Image (cartoon, rainbow, N blue to C red):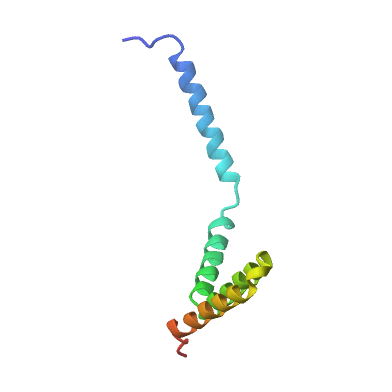
Amino acid sequence: MTNPVGIEEKYKEMAEDVDEVKRAFASMPSDIPLAKKRKGLDFLVGRLKEPSTWRGLAAIATACGAYMSPEMVGEIVTCGFTIIGLLGVATRDKKE
């Protein structure tokens, strides 16, 4: 059986493209992305496990709400402190 015209040329072009991609990946630094991303993710997850982070986020949201709606400052602040208090009651202190 004979090959249709142009198949060998297409195969060679594809092989050259694959080799070019392999060379591009081989030249990339291998020690940077995954380790640093993992370290950053571990840091973020560690902070999200701490009650103080949640209290801080609630306080920031309260401040932003009071800024965005000055006529409702009292209600927003009361709601924010309620959330902060509930977070304090619902979360455990770190055992050392």
Q: In this view, does 66 lie above or below 2?
A: below
Residue lying furthest bottom: 96
Q: What residue is drawn where x is 35% and y is 9%?
A: 2
Percent across and percent down for residue 63 are 65, 72
Percent across and percent down for residue 31 are 57, 57
Residue placed most toward the observer, 94 or 18: 94
Q: In which quarter of the image is residue 80?
A: bottom right
Residue placed most toward the observer, 12 or 63: 63
Q: How many marks?
A: 0
Visible residue check, residue 53: no
Percent across and percent down for residue 49 are 48, 75
Q: Quadrant of residue 70?
A: bottom right
Percent across and percent down for residue 20 are 56, 34
Residue placed most toward the observer, 36 or 67: 67
Residue placed most toward the observer, 45 or 72: 72
Q: What residue is drawn where x is 54% and y is 68%?
A: 44
Q: Is residue 24 above or below residue 15?
A: below
